[in-house]
Amino acid sequence: MPLQTVNGRACRWAGASVKVLKMISVDEAQRMILDRVPVLPTEIVALSETTGRILRQDIYADMDMPPFDRARMDGYALRAADLAIVPARLRVLGQLAAGQQFDGQVGPGQAVRIMTGAPVPDGADAVQKVEATATDQQTVTIYESVKVGQFITPRGSEATRGQHLIAAGQRITPADIAVMATFGYAQVRVSQSLTVNVLSTGNELVEVNQTPSIAQIRNSNGYALRSYLDQLGARSSFLGIVPDDEELILQRIKAALPQCDVLILSGGVSMGDYDLVKHALRRLGADIVFDRVCIHPGKPTVFALLEHKPVFALPGNPVSVAVTFLNFVYPALNKMMGARDIFLPSFRAILEADAKHAPDRRSYLPGRLTSREGQLTVAPLRWGGSSDLIAFRHANALIIVPEGLSLIQAGQLCHTILIPHMSWASAAAKESQPIR
Ligand code: AMP
Ligand code: MG
């Protein structure tokens, strides 16, 4: 294909023929990606290092929990029948702290001073809290009667030995770590870390610490992509900005590939004369699986396999990067990491205002999801299109307008997916007025 020089850089002739594949639906694109990405091998790591990693083993209880009938209050272990008439005076046999065991037996008219977490002594069938008692060391007066079992957490009531507690595929949370610590999992099998390299392409881009001259802008995609990857628990490196030069793009892809499991590029994939990423990928022998998806924003998204590694080349506009990352890269990386839930959470919500778009593609419009009187509602944001990263910051959800529809009217139910860049809790807490 003929090359031309512009600003000293090689580029393709305007109008040179570009092979374009069939436009496919979002669902097809997701299927094609998920059919092709591999699941990473596992490794064993120390429990304390596993937050956010994907668990690759099932977790079982190695003992009953609690392992004994456990006092739930500081008070007195006693026999409920002894408190049929209150106040009742009982003889105190001794004191039992958490971690201690009582050798004797609690008989009629007797009690043992007991602390929260200690095993209830044999013979006792309830605990009365210290606030309902008065003592002179030898005896205790109990002012309120109790039911059998009161303030006792019975052995095995939270988990029984052998019980399945956490399924493989879980992204490990602090609560999961507490469970694994309780049942003796000092080492845990998780997915190996996923390594992702990120390249930004574009002649107009400068780095964040530079002042753009006229016609230049700072690279935001490289940073946004790394931030999404951080949230996913992937290890990522930003390998810099590549000018719109086919040869340079080719060289940088070639250099980036060996050190990663997945390569993500942004920019240079649409139909402009300087959109050369696909050409570079082809010249490297990549299998281009698709290069156009029926999605707005993000139509020219490219997914390819190069030396069996997934390569995502996303359109350069920042909102397109976010929408295509969330729809295509996010589930792919989750599958690779062995996650059970690979897609973003989705909700049906009532639209607060009309959501419009051209009906030829499925649209993902930035919105603000909130709960009003127990009902999820979503307000479309006013935005200036796929470059408007300033407005997009306020979105916590994407409103889906299905292909074939140009409008979903206010008051109707629509499908939304949650954007992970703003937590649901903070969004709900902040939300009072829709941004219109
Ligand atoms: P492209 O996909 O290369 O045609 O780029 C589409 C738009 O996205 C252009 O306005 C680019 O300047 C912009 N863009 C491309 N890459 C980046 C980037 N890394 N950060 C911010 N904007 C970008
Ligand atoms: Mg460009």
Image (spheres, helix red, strand yellow):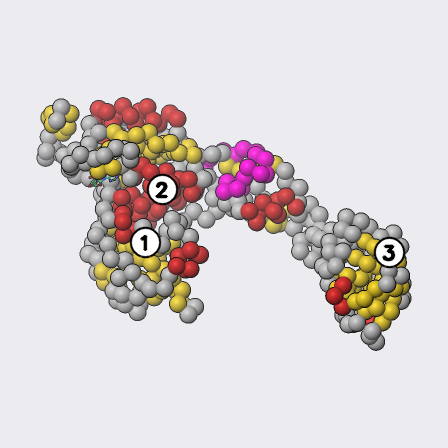
Q: Kindly identify which residue carries mark 2.
A: 329
Q: Residue furthest front?
A: 136
Please say whether residue 385 is visible from this viewpoint: yes
Label 1, label 3: how many angstroms apart (C-alpha)? 62 Å
> First in sequence: mark 1 or mark 2?
2
Residue to which mark 3 is pinned? 94
Question: What secondary structure is marked by label 1?
Answer: loop
**Considering only vertical position in the picture, is 190 above or below 98?**
above
Of 275 and 102, nearer the camera is 102
Magenta-span inclusion, residue 266: no
Taking the image as four quarters, which one is ligand 1 found in? Answer: top left
Range of the magenta residues? 39-56
- Identified by mark 1, the residue type is His
Q: Residue 82 appears at what percent x and percent y?
A: 85, 70
Q: Is residue 51 magenta?
A: yes
Q: Mark 1 = which residue?
A: 394
Q: Is residue 54 visible?
A: no
